[in-house]
Amino acid sequence: MIQYGPLLERLLAGEFICQISDEDAYRRLNDEQTQQQINQYLRPLNRRLVGSERQSVYYLGYVDLTRTAREQLSKQFSETIQALLPLLEWLLLVQETMGNDRALSAGDTIKLQEFVLRAEDNQGLRQRLNLLANHRFFNSHSDALDNQVKLIFRRLKEYGYLVQPHAQRQYYIVTAKIDYLIELINFIRSEEHLPVADTPTQEELL
């Protein structure tokens, strides 16, 4: 398993891997034989490779829900719930600001300056962006829209929802981790009945 060492380390660290974030690693994980070898190695650790419904993104889950696994999952789930509403609001803001008829999906490109310019022309969007930037998930301390948007996108890059192909060029590409997020939202709303706002716009988004 030496050839998979760096890849396993990334997965065990909680990374989500898709064709957008790492095309070579995704291609390897998409191979059935590789999946079997990785799962065989991970079995003693009570971990396994998991794919989204469309196999667009891979990450690690647990084989057996032991007490330790449940505690870890509970912690992760709590953190995800806290981030859920700001992430949903960001999705809606991008869709409205860019005038898209559909929700964001993996591979979509967002040009930062174009996003800022469009938002500046709409007072309602500016106010919502200000509230979003000041949410504890993003924790902005700036009143300038440009700085707020840069912080939001930087944080989303850190969390794996966006990649920035060129450090000196201000555009981002949406990763397939967004598919995981949408699947999680649908699961929460259908099975757990946890507090995800049920506005008409979010109905359209999902």
Image: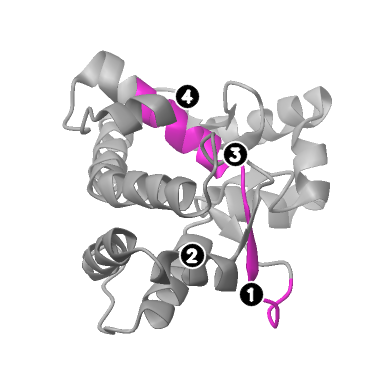
Q: Position of residue 116 (x, y in %)?
A: 48, 71
Which residue in the protein does label 1 denote?
170
Q: State the residue at coordinates (57%, 27%).
A: 52
Nearest the viewer among 189 and 48 is 189
Mark 3: amino acid: Ser
Q: CA distance from mark 1 to mark 4?
A: 40 Å
Locate the N terminus by quadrant: top right
Which residue in the protein does label 3 denote?
105
Which residue in the protein does label 4 denote?
63
Q: State the residue at coordinates (33%, 34%).
A: 69
Q: Secondary structure at mark 3?
A: loop
Mark 1: amino acid: Gln
Q: Secondary structure at mark 4?
A: loop
As drawn, 165 above or below 22: below
Residue 57 appears left or right of 177: right
State which tag comes first along the sequence, 2 or 3: 3
How dense is the environment of label 3, judged by Cα within 10 Å: few (below 14), some, or many (20 and up)? some
